[in-house]
Amino acid sequence: MFFNWWCFLFFGTFLEFTPDAARNGLARLCLWSVIERMKLYKFLPLILTTFSFTLYYFYPLFWGPHPYKAFIYFQTMMYLIMGLWWGYAFLRERNITHVFLMHIFFQIGYYTADIWKFIGEL
């Protein structure tokens, strides 16, 4: 039984979340490098990329059903805080590896919580 859950978690995590982390990281890194070349302000890439990616999670507020509005606010604030935190870590270290790993670990936690919720409903 343990082997089946381990395989499920392993393949679900690396096949589902690694491309997501790579896609988000690559898009943010490309936008970051374009803004950084302007040499206007040290924290401008951090601020602009964080807010642009946070808007992606905020736009359902305008068309989503009313019961989900609290979750949309929560999700937007969560991604705003994570974006600023992880963006600052990249700005400080100039290394994408640990930001990529933090993204994957967060997704594993989110995925595991979703699995536990599903198991509780069985």
Image: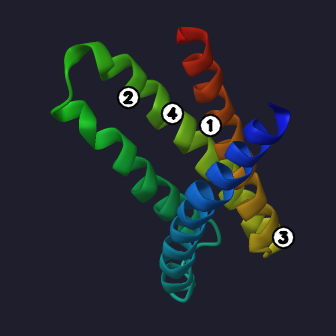
Q: Earlier in the sequence, mark 1 or mark 2?
A: 2
* Residue at x 72%, y 58% (from the top left corner): 88
Do the residues under discs 1 and 2 have CB atoms within 8 angstroms?
no
For disc 2, the marked residue is 72
Task: Determine which residue is flagged by label 4.
Answer: 77
Residue at figure coordinates x 74%, y 72% from the top left: 96
* Residues at circles 4 and 3 in contact by the CB criterion of under 8 Å: no
Three-letter code for the amino acid on which mark 4 is drawn = Met
The span from disc 1 to disc 3 (Cα, nearest Å) is 28 Å
Q: Position of residue 42 (x, y in %)?
A: 65, 72
Determine whether label 3 and label 2 are within 8 Å by CB.
Answer: no
Instruction: Report crowding for label 4: few under 14, some 14 to 19, many 20 or more residues within 10 A (C-alpha).
Output: some
- SS class of the residue under badge 4? helix
Q: Where residue 70 sits: x, y (%)? A: 38, 17
- The residue sitting at 81% across, 63% down in the picture is 98
Asked whether, in this view, residue 1 is left or right of residue 121, the answer is right
Quadrant location, the C terminus: top right
Residue 111 numbered tag: 1
Q: Of the residues shown, which amino acid type is indicated by label 1?
A: Tyr
Circle 2: element type = helix
Q: Judge left or right: residue 77 versus residue 84.
A: left
Location of mark 3 (residue): 93
Furthest-front residue in view?
Answer: 1
Q: Measure how far apart labels 1 and 2 are at the Cα level.
A: 18 Å
Q: What's the distance in space between the residues labelled 3 and 2, CA to CA?
A: 31 Å
* Residue projecting furthest to the left: 63
Q: Amino acid at mark 2?
A: Ile
Residue drawn at (25%, 31%) of the image: 61
